[in-house]
Amino acid sequence: MRHLLHPFPQGTGALKSSKCWPGLHKAQYFRLHAQQPKALHEQQSSSPPHAHQPSSEDALIDSLLEPPSIDYLKQRNKSKLQPPAIKPLPPLDNCKHFVNLTNGLEALPLLHELGLHYNYVRIQSTACEQQKWESLIVDLDTNMLMSLALGQCCLVWDYGSRHHKTGNPRALWLGLEFIRYALTKLWFGKEAAARCGALPRGYNAALQFDEYLRYFSKPTLRRMRYFSKWVHPHTTELRLHGVYSLTTHDDDSEFYHSVLYNHEGPNTPNTSIQRPPSSSLAAGPLNGPESLEIQEPIAGKPKDVHGTDALLASKGLSVHYRGLTFHEFVQQQRDLGLSNE
């Protein structure tokens, strides 16, 4: 996974190139950080008495993002990460839906068919691939952040083309993982983030994500922290999941324009969405369509108590709940018949 998650932030002098891991500049990186406290002390000692003092909010952010201690790292390496159990998806009409631009537009016909209201979001796979995490966070939709703070289940709809069997796009298996981890740390604290984990494809990327967060600008961190004031008292975790499938229309702008303009525009207000019977939205296992069988869970997925997974599967869609531990990832590959790839 080293090629997926470069552990050192870009823009740190000689380390600006993403190809420096694990090569020539690793020692330079640690020398740079070893010199930072001294340089900071010299700067503070030379500052005039009336120099700007950080606010209490900035001080709290700094405390949340301070580097881990050596004892913590030793304990982390010895302990086995056990992320919290995944909760089953509620019925679709109890979720908040977000169409990820651009490929997620392919989901508009189904969303209208099911009578589901939605908003747009832009989580770019390219930003994930290039480790532009701050840009990705800045682009997040305010509706999504408020919904997460209120404890609502948020589903990001997207289509991928890289993986020829599952279609799970990088914006979901890597982008959502960073968003969930970063918001958990800034809203609920270090311990909650440690329990949440950051597990893209079986790899624990928490330390790398922490390093990137420490290089975020203060305005970005304040914006992320702002929504913590709206966290519902009963919200204990962020329910952010992806709904995905394989697409054959990647980079087909004509197709996406056609889908969008057929469902959105000045003469097609959102009120034109017709609400179907609740049974078609998987209101419960006893009310669902007879053709939908509730399946037992596979690795990384809970039991489908509401029939939501079955409904989505009948439409050719899968659910990305969260990142997987290494053993869960291996088991998932076996369940999907991909163990030899």
Image (cartoon, rainbow, N blue to C red):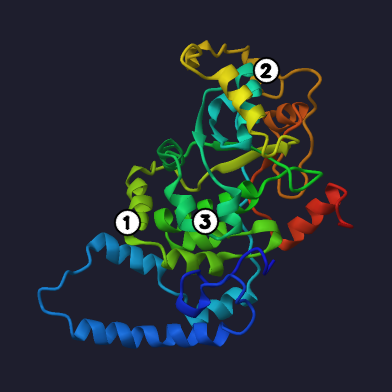
Residue at 48 percent across and 66 percent down: it is 212
Residue at 57 percent across and 83 percent down: it is 26
Foreground: 261 or 290? 261
Disc 1 residue type (three-letter)? Pro
Q: Position of residue 238 (x, y in %)?
A: 51, 46
Disc 2 residue type (three-letter)? Ser
Foreground: 158 or 64? 158
**Quadrant of the drawing holding the N terminus:** bottom right
Return the residue at label 1: 219
Return the residue at label 3: 181
**Quadrant of the drawing holding the C terminus:** bottom right
Label 2 to label 1: alpha-carbon separation: 44 Å
Foreground: 216 or 289? 216
Tell me whether the residue at label 2 lies in contact with that at label 1, contact meaning CB atoms closer than 8 angstroms: no
Residue at 62 percent across and 65 percent down: it is 5
Image position of 110 with respect to 11: above or below: above
Image position of 207 with respect to 172: above or below: below
Q: Position of residue 64 (x, y in %)?
A: 39, 65
